[in-house]
Image: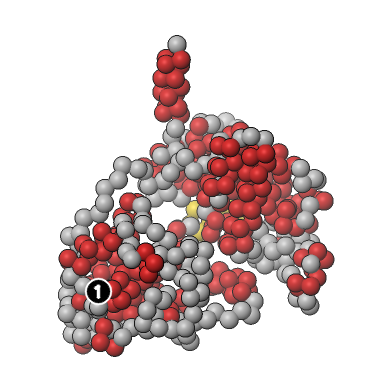
Amino acid sequence: MAPASDIRPLEKFIVPAELDGRHGAYRRPQAQCLLKATNDHQAILAWIQSKHGLTLEQKRALRAGRRHRGLGVELGTDWLQELSHTQRSYRKEAERFLLRAIVQKGKALSSMTHEDCTGYRDFLADPQPRGRWCGARSRERWSPLWRPFAGALAPSAQRQAISILKNLYGFLVDQNYLMGNPWSAVGVPRGRAAKVNAGRSLTRAQWAFVQQQLALMGAFEARTSAQQRLAFALDLLYATGLRLSELVAAKVDDLVWVEYAADAADDQPLQGWLLRVVGKGQKAREVPVPIEVVATLAAYLDARGLDPDPQYIGNRTAHLLGKATDVAQRAPALMGERVIDAFEGVAGTTLYRQLKGFFGECAQVLRHRGDVKGAERFEQASTHWMRHSHASHAIAAGMPIEIAQQNLGHASLATTTVYVTTESKRRMRAVQKFWGK
């Protein structure tokens, strides 16, 4: 997609000189500003860079995954292709608001008023004209068909967008770039729904069905490298509730064997595995991993040509989930002379597509059996459904909610309580039983 002053991604959008914010209505004098940025576009980039980004290792893995593909971005902004999940979310909302300000309102971002922000809040619920602002979610950022919206935002997404834009303007005020925050008095849409949708999870019976479908692939050693990765990834996701980004970033040496002696609270010693994880906001935590899941990892490492012992020093820096090591044998035309490094990690997008494809196959099986509702759920399922499934099933099985909170990396216990469905289920069953009589 060529750079232009029309609907373009942030890295391709050319801000007209008269609207770039150099002379914005609410700009502070440049000599008093704590940013080097001289216009709104540069100020947005400084704000995005201030957020927690990828580690150096994650950036290297991302570059390796791209191989030698051109990024299609201007020199100096290529770092926008190496953003963390948080940075991508912030870029998306700033990008949308900047485009709305310049393309539709004809105003610099630093000239937007409280009334403009209130109007944008309403715009989020119905982006019009749709032909100009909305497009298929699957369009890549380099595509001429890319659009900033897929459609109207749900109330929860509207609240998130407004919260991020308040953060952007708060940053600009703190850095003495702007004299005030027009978003500070803008109310957010109310909604009764919980932020986390615990319904986006598999039932215990559906998880058992997943295991049955995996078993149909044959013995672990006889499966393709991609199938082995799929089986291990599903087990690990279900056992730990990791986020997709956390899973693909995890290394073998992040696994630690620990031994706990008997104490006054528990007279039995305990041994097991902990996985060190860096989650949202670069917050570190340790998540217990069942011994049986690590046994599956040992078989997976062995199949990749690595030592099956996770603690073997030669496995250091190897990713838990690697690229398919048998591609050269299965599709030599695709590989050429390139050899897959068994230590390399799989890209998050690749794993996401693989799990979505597998869930789609599960949906086809259920639809053939006449289970339409079950098929529809598997068609919607994604990697994040495994996180919800872990939380719901673990708490229902008796895991203390504060332990589930620590394992999931939730900042608030209120987020984890969304998964406490046992009492609601008991009440629903009681009413159904009463009505049946």
At a point 37% along the width and 64% down the height, the residue shown is 130
Residue 267 sits above or below residue 235 on the image: above
Residue 41 point in image, percent of width and height? 33, 80
Please tell me which residue is depicted at 51% across the width and 67% down the height of the picture. 139
Nearer to us in this view, 175 or 361: 361
Image coloring type: secondary structure
- Left or right of 383: which side holds 330? right
Rendered location of residue 138, percent (x, y) = 52, 63
Q: Residue at x 36, y 43 (%)?
A: 194
Q: Is residue 230 above or below residue 341?
A: above
Rendering quarter of residue 197: top left
401 up-or-down from 60: above or below? above
Query: Which sits in the foreground, 123 or 49?
Result: 123
Quadrant the C terminus occupies: top left
- Count all numbered tags in the image, as a single digit: 1
Percent position of residue 192, x then y: 31, 42
The kind of secondary structure element at disc 1 is: loop
- Residue 263 sits in which quadrant? top right
Q: Residues within 10 Å of mark 1 (few under 14, many from 20)?
A: few
Instruction: Give the quadrant of residue 336.
Output: bottom right
Is residue 118 visible from the viewing direction of this image? Answer: yes
In-image side of 213 versus 269 (left or right): right
Q: Amino acid at mark 1?
A: Lys
| Residue 124 % position (x, y) | 31, 60
Q: Which residue is mark 1?
A: 105
Q: Residue at x 72, y 57 (%)?
A: 226
For this view, does 104 lie left or right of residue 352?
A: left
Q: Residue furthest top?
A: 437
| Res 318 visible | no
